[in-house]
Image: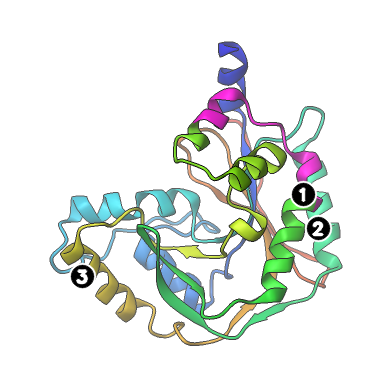
Amino acid sequence: MSEHVHETQALPRYALYYAPRAEEPLAVAASRWLGRNPETGEARELVPVSGVPHERLSAIVAEPRLYGFHGTLKPPIVLAEGATERDFIEAVGTFAATERQIDVPALALAEVQDFLALVPAARCAALQDFSDRCVVEFDEFRRPADEAELARRRAAGLTQRQEDLLLRWGYPYVLEQGRFHLTLTGRVTEPRERAAILDELRSRFMAVVDRPLAVRDLCVFRQPAPGRPFSVAARFRLGGGRRLATQVWRAA
């Protein structure tokens, strides 16, 4: 079992995400906030936040920085035995060509459990349906979770429905248990710190909050190894059948 777990953990992971294009205001604001652009790979120093030490700010954005600014459509997976990266990316491109742009009426800054994120201001049925289909359509590419992964997920405390989803789809917070969000922080529970971060986010993202969001693309993100950052491996325009970006991956 330990050999299997070690092998699985060493393999790349892939996810289906929505991510704004690098030149869009939302992407620009997010890359400045998180200090990294997942499409270009560009890293930058974090802009200070009043009242929050630099080391603490780095910790607050560490997880969303690692994953890259995104909204999850299918959570990260290890590819099933026999499936290749090329197979997966080609299947995503074929799927994206049959879809249409999704227009979310407005974004809102919200507290989601203990972290802060941008979310649709009201439920968007088209976006929920799209996310659900991404979970289902690409499950054939998912290697089943090993016991270590299942135990890690269960440690958070799952409802029976979430346990069922974990066993069926490899992740407990999908379908009706999922909520589309664009993560901006890790856990922030101290009230004064949370208030300072919220004020900063309102200022940084004022150009996109309460504005429509056009979900135009479906992206494949890739994490080459544990602890390494996720980056855009391919980007497809919905309904266009055209790959907008692809990164070439080489063994590190």
Q: Residue at x 59, y 86 (%)?
A: 105
For residue 53, the mark is none
Stretch in magenta: 137-151
Percent of width and height locating residue 148: 54, 25
- Horizontally, residue 101 falls left or right of residue 228, namely right
Q: Is residue 86 visible?
A: no
| Element type where label 2 sits in the image | helix
Residues at discs 2 and 1 in contact (Cβ within 8 Å): yes
The quarter of the picture where residue 8 lies is top right
Percent of width and height locating residue 111: 38, 67
State the residue position of label 3: 196
Residue 127 among magenta residues: no
Q: Is residue 63 visible?
A: yes
Front position among marks 2 and 3: 3
State the residue position of label 1: 89
State the residue position of label 2: 93
Query: In the picture shown, does residue 141 fall above or below 18?
Result: above
Percent of width and height locating residue 23: 53, 74
| Element type where label 1 sits in the image | helix
| Element type where label 3 sits in the image | helix
Q: Residue at x 77, y 40 (%)?
A: 141
